[in-house]
Structure formats: structure tokens, C-alpha cells
Image: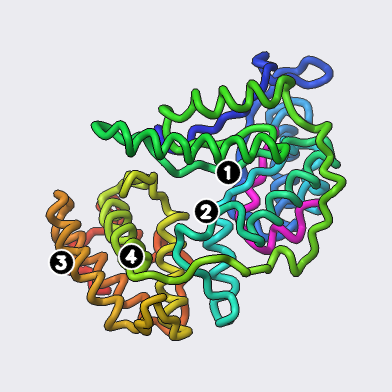
Amino acid sequence: MLAHSLLRIGRDRAPLTFANSTRLLAKNSLPKMEHYLEARLWNDIFRMAQDYVGVPRGSIRATVLIETITASFQMDEIIYELREHSSGLNCGRWDYIFSFIKKMRMHPDFVLPDRSNVTMTVPFMDSYVRLLIKTCHKRGVAAIGGMAAQIPIKNDEAKNNAVMDKVRADKQRECDAGHDGTWVAHPGLVKIALDIFNKGMPGPNQYHIRREDVNVTALDLLNTNVPGGISEDGVRGNCMALLHYCANWVAGLGCVPVANLMEDAATAEISRSQLWHWVRHGASTVDGHKITTGYVDKFIDEEAVKTKQSGLDAKRVDLCARYLKSQIRAQALSDFLTTDLTCARPFHSPYPLSLIHI
């Protein structure tokens, strides 16, 4: 699969082994965790599975994606519960932003600006990263960086160079911060990440960077002092990304290149939750336009026309446009768009798209 190429980068390229030279049986990632009791459950599952097949405990290793705001408050506890099987923690940055918005959805003080302004250097994201690295290295496990969502641009050297510069800056920031590896969204970005980590991390990890200078508080993890505002382009961009992603999702695709970014469920969820949040709390754009359902409807309709012109199935686009309009009018933000739209996917639904009403 092209998207989400995981790089565990370092000089040590030998197969993963234990101290007793027992070969690693399986390596997994545990996503969406919200509480240390979930980690305890997974530890019990791993123990039972290893005992059942007759292999030593510890043959299964797992990296937990810290991609919910609640999990960021329990990183020590999660590592402890998985201490027999933990490979470390990973910054699941895009799901983390979505989780942040969703958990704070009823609070107007937590309204965020354009998605493009919510970078890894804004206060609540920077605090989360620094705390994760400190926690992992204190416990002797890997702290893996987040996914760079940019993808190479064909037939436009200037734009492609600008994208590559963004990826380099992102991976350099991670390496300098003390991460032990990273993610990229496209195989064409692997060499950039490798070059940076091989130069900045000559050993297999950076556990020696203890980050004892870090003192992150609960308030730091909730600090939404994010520069920038909500622009018309930001509202339109969210509508465009959602229509493209949702129309591809119901067609059976989970990762979609849109506007030179690799959109997946997490990035689409940021766009959906932002639109709901902005409408719910009566936010305004930097030009003074109040963000209402009618204001967003205009962009959904305009972008739906463009999305159809790009070659996507018109019925699927219309379905997704109706879904998005229903979402911004909902009293409560639904948990996941993928759950909402699963019934419309071809291998789930016994009904034609024209019969599915949202």
C-alpha cells in the first residue's frame, strides 16, 4: 500500500530480535486508543495468543498510536500496561487533531483556525510531541514521529520542490526533537526521511535524548493559542477535501490524493469536524462572514460540480454532498464519517446509491 509507509530509521538494519535471540513473531500498531485499560486488554490478548500457539511471551510487539487527546494524558500508563510487548509510541498527528476537536466540540473556546494553520509547531501539538518523546525515552522505547501528508507533484518542478522542502523541514524537526523514526505518505518521500535520520541519528535510536528540559502540563496539552484565522479558502478547502475523500470512500478507496496531499479518514475527519464546529459556534471568517449552514452549502454545491468534473461518479458525489449538508446541521457531531458512509460502500450495501437517503 502506497500510503502510510512506516520508516523505523536507524543504522541497525538487522532483523528485530530479543535478548535471547528469539525471532520476533509479529509487530503491530494499536490505533485509536483512549485509555490505559485498553492497553491492558491488548496485553492480555497478546499473552493469550502467545500461550495458545506456544511461543515465548514478548514475541509480539506493538507500537501504540497516540492519536486521541485522552491518551496523551495516559502515556506512562499505556506503556506500563504493555511493558511486555511495547515497541513504543507513535504521534498519530492527524487523528489527534480530529480527536481534539471532537472532544472539545461543545466548547467555543476551542474553535481552531484553518486546517492548514494547525501545524506541529502550534502550542498543543508541540506539547504533545515533546511529552511523547520524553515519556518514551524515559521508559526505553521508541518515539515515532508523525506522517507527512505531502505527496510528490508531477510535471511542475517548482511546486514539487516546495512540497519536498516542507517534508524536509518536517522530518528535520522530528529528528532534532529526538524522534527515533517517522512516517511518510508516499514512497517517493522515503529517501528524504532516510537521509535526514541517517545523518541526525547515527545509532539505531535517540534514547539518550531524555528531554529532561520538558515540563508539559495539562494546560499545555489544551493550549489552543493557534495563530491564524478562518478564511474562505479554508472553508472551501474543507468542503473540497471532504467531497473527494467521501466519494472515493464509498467507492472502496481509503486514501486519496487531493490538492497535493494524501487524504485519509483522519484528515477528512478534521475537515468535517471543523465545519461542524464553526457552524455550531457561529464562527466568522477573517473577512467577517458568519459561517452558517447556508454559507457552507454554497461551497459544497460549487465543489460538488468540480468534483464531478474531475471524473468521480456523480451519484456518489451527490450522496456525499447530501451527507455533508446533513452533518453541518446535526445537533451532535457523529463519531466517524466512515461509519456513517459504510452502508454506501459497494461491498456492504445491497441497495443502489439512489435508494440511500442521508
Magenta stretch holds residue 69 = yes
| Residue bearing mark 1 | 146
Task: Check disc 2 and report its element: helix, strand or loop.
Answer: helix
Quadrant occupied by the C terminus: bottom left
Taking the spot 16% from the left edge, 50% from the top edge, the residue there is 310
- Residue 223 found in image quarter: bottom right
* Closest to the observer, 275 or 31: 275
Taking the spot 37% from the left edge, 84% from the top edge, the residue there is 290
Residue 353's disc is none
Quadrant occupied by the N terminus: top left
Taking the spot 31% from the left edge, 66% from the top edge, the residue there is 236
Q: Earlier in the sequence, mark 4 or mark 3?
A: 4
* Closest to the observer, 347 or 290: 290
Magenta stretch holds residue 67 = yes
Choose mark 2 or mark 3, whichever is in front: 2
Q: Earlier in the sequence, mark 2 or mark 4?
A: 2
Residue 94's disc is 2
| Residue bearing mark 3 | 354
Q: Earlier in the sequence, mark 3 or mark 1?
A: 1
| Residue bearing mark 4 | 233
Task: Check disc 4 and report its element: helix, strand or loop.
Answer: helix
Is 332 situated above or below 154? below
Residue type of the residue flagged with mark 4: Asp
